[in-house]
Image (cartoon, helix red, strand yellow):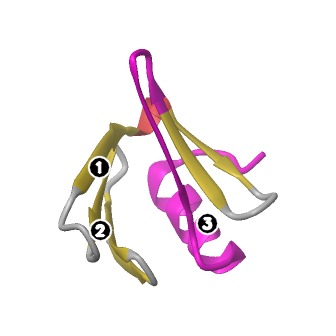
Amino acid sequence: MVIEFSGGRLIVSPQEILVKLSASGASLYAMADDVRLLSAGHIMVADAGAVRWHLTLDGPEQLAEVADCLGVAIS
């Protein structure tokens, strides 16, 4: 599933997520098990030990789409 947001694109599958940031051309990657979704602020957090990143999505609808595809609960 591809989700467009103001900062770029999310490419989401049940196992992983790839974020392609349009402004910098950077890509962020995480396995589904390493992702948390926070309803306060529509934030996606990836924490895989030494590598951590977070991303603010445009709204709760996008967060719900990511949650459905990854099978991750929103907290």
- Whether residues under marks 1 and 2 lie with C-beta atoms below 8 angstroms apart, the answer is yes
Residue 2: image x %, image y %? 31, 75
Instruction: Report whether 52 appears left or right of 24.
Output: right
Q: Which residue is mark 1?
A: 28
- Looking at the rendered structure, the kind of residue marked 3 is Leu
Looking at the image, which residue is at 40% across and 76% down? 7
Distance from the alpha carbon under mark 3 to that under mark 1: 17 Å
Tell me the quarter of the picture where residue 16 sits: top left
Q: The residue tagged with tag 3: helix, strand or loop?
A: helix
Residue 12, position in %: x, y? Answer: 34, 60
Q: Earlier in the sequence, mark 1 or mark 2?
A: 2
Picture coordinates of residue 43 (x, y %)? 64, 56
Residue at disc 1, secondary structure: strand
Tag on residue 21? 2
The residues colored magenta run 47-75
Which amino acid lies under the numbered mark 2 shown in the image of this protein? Leu
